[in-house]
Amino acid sequence: MSGTESGTEQFGVLERGEHEVTLRFVRRLPHTPGKVWRALTEPEHLAAWFPTTIEGDLAVGSELRFGFREGQALPFDGRMLAFDPPALMELIWGDERLRFELTADGTGTRLTFTASFTELGRAARDGAGWHVCLDLLGYDLGDVKAPWQQNERWSSVHSEYVARFGPDAATVGPPAELAETYRLASDPDR
């Protein structure tokens, strides 16, 4: 069990703005804000769920460097926009703005995560990707191994994001490392 709510509330929503789109996810996690904050900021926890490493000072205005642990792509730069432990972290991650907001919710934490970017066509692809990352975060917080492979999980939720967001939000296909898995998962004759 991932420690997140089950059902459709796990799916992100797409907010279409004039100059950017935002994916918004709300997850209720049965862990304290302090524990969730550590999972968002400490390298050993980030390795379990976040797509890249985060190098640099975790402080407002700091320049950051992001690298893929298995060398899937070149490293890229970003910047810390807001950092208020254990409640708020906002950063530029390549061409995206990521925002993590934590609020106490009974004995747990409500995590609101947003990813904002300009290219609508990648919303379904990225929505599925962040969905999987947040699922992995929940498993890491519960000290449980996910019962699926990341590529398989991405393929299983991607079609739901395409249906929810529409064809104009699904013009950019899966990341290269998922392309073969996606093709096999969507091929009924395999």
Image: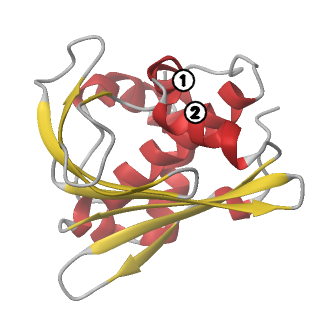
Confirm whether residue 189 shows in the render.
no
Q: Residue furthest top?
A: 70
Residue hosting label 2: 39
SS label for mark 1 = helix
- Percent x, y of residue 130: 46, 46
Q: Pointer 2 and pointer 1: residues touching (CB < 8 Å)?
A: yes
Please identify the quadrant where the N terminus is shown. top right
Residue hosting label 1: 45
- Percent x, y of residue 24: 49, 67
Q: What colour scheme has been applied to the protein in the rendered image? A: secondary structure
Amino acid type at image mark 2: Ala
Seen in the picture, residue 38 relative to 131 is either above or below; the reply is above
Q: Quadrant of residue 45?
A: top right
Residue occupying the point 56% across, 46% down: 157
Amino acid type at image mark 1: His
Residue occupying the point 70% across, 16% down: 145
Neighbourhood count class around disc 2 (C-alpha, 10 Å): few under 14, some 14–19, many 20 upward = many
The earlier-in-sequence mark between 2 and 1 is 2
Q: Residue furthest bottom?
A: 18
- Percent x, y of residue 8: 72, 62
Query: In the image, is 29 to the left or to the right of 73?
Result: right
Please tell me which residue lies in front, 107 or 3.
107
The alpha-carbon separation of the residues under discs 2 and 1 comes to: 5 Å
SS label for mark 2 = helix
Residue occupying the point 71% across, 64% down: 9
- The mark found on residue 190 in the picture is none
Q: Quadrant of residue 74?
A: top left
Neighbourhood count class around disc 1 (C-alpha, 10 Å): few under 14, some 14–19, many 20 upward = some
- Percent x, y of residue 97: 28, 59
